Image: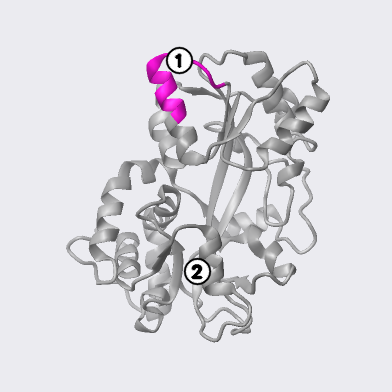
Amino acid sequence: MVYANSSKVEKAAEAFMELYPEINVQAYDLGGDDVLMKTLEEQKAGAFTGDVWFSSGGADLVGQVLPKNYVWRFVPDSTAAYTPEQYTQPLLMSRFGTSVFAYNSELNDTCPITNIWELTQPEWKGKFFIEDPLNDASTLSKLITFAFHADEVKQAYVDLYGSEPVLDADTPDAGWLWLKRFAQNGPIPQPGGDEVDSAFATPGMTESYMALTSYSNIADVQEGILAFEPCWGIQPKLGVQSQSYVGIINQAPHPNAAKLWVKFVTSPDGRDPWAKFGTYFPDSTYEVPEGQKPLDEMFEMTWFIAEQYAYDHMLEARDFYLLNLGK
């Protein structure tokens, strides 16, 4: 039994059962929050039902799941052969998603800003769309990641304004100051990524907006469904990388089948349902589609989500963001 947060898991399960017809796979696209909740509840109750964690988890994974050994790390030899060690900790990473600052490419030839501090200026008040960080822990974790990289955010301020930022009493460093000013500038929350894209990147719009969106949605740009481009070169970083993990749930009823799933889903055939423009894999031999930035280049322009820091500061950051929103 596989607990996942991807609709494509069903296609992977079908391919797995063609290869191993003697194994019946029940693969559920639960969504990240429900994967977490179901795993925690089953482990606490001793009702060991799930076999495979196949989800992101982010801050809650490192804060609640792994410290209690609710999910175990397993790296097949075949996967280890082409996966750098850093992408196997704390669990084996199955793929990467990239959230980027982006702009409407029909209304702008280039990104209208070069620095994230410009998003705190009056001309961008109420002009930025984002998945609601008050209701989406993943989005809030991405914003917290900018707070975590306070030194780089401070340097970006100096590069833009020529002087160091003056901190407020409730901002211990430039990272938290940026988060405060960003919230005060009234970013417009949306319930999901599709709504974000429709709000800022629908073809034919007449007013320019920006957003934090998924790089993989460039595929919709190529098909003419959307009109946006990432803000290449924005300082200090283009965006944030999130990781999806695959691991063996504690006391899995079918541990050997679970290990086969991990081996399969990290192989070229197993990952095929996700092998689309904008998605990255830790496999060092994977060749990205034409036009997609190579993995190493994208990693230089982005930060990994600061998962432990986000977990430690999640409640604080949510209250802080809400207190300053639109002020």
Residue 160 falls in image quadrant = bottom left
Classify 133 as above or below 90: below
Name the residue: 60% across, 54% down.
299
In this picture, residue 63 sits left or right of residue 103: left
Placement of 149 over or under 124, stated as above or below: above
Q: Is residue 302 above or below residue 48?
A: below
Residue 47 numbered tag: 1
Name the residue at 38% across, 69% down.
187
Residue 167 locus on image (x, y percent): 24, 67
Hey, what amino acid is under mark 2?
A: Ala
Q: Secondary structure at mark 1?
A: loop
Is 67 included in the stretch rendered in magenta?
Answer: no
Residue annotated with mark 2: 211
Image quarter in which the N terminus is found: top right
**In this picture, is 48 found above or below 269?**
above
Tell which of 238 and 95 is nearer to you.
95
- Residue 317: x %, y % from top left: 30, 53
- Estimate how packed mark 1 is, as few (under 14), some (14 to 19) or many (20 or more) residues with alpha carbons within 10 Å: few
Q: Could you tell me if residue 238 is visible in this image? A: no
The answer to which of 131 and 301 lies nearer the viewer is 131
Q: Is residue 117 visible?
A: yes
Where residue 154 appears, as percent x and y from the top left, is: 37, 66
Determine the residue positioned at 56% across, 78% down: 111
Seen in the image, is 264 located left or right of residue 164?
Answer: right
Magenta span of residues: 38-50
Query: Under tag 2, what secondary structure?
Result: strand
Render colour scheme = one colour
Distance in Å between CA atoms under marks 2 and 1: 42 Å
- Residue 38 figure quarter: top left
**Earlier residue among tags 2 and 1:** 1
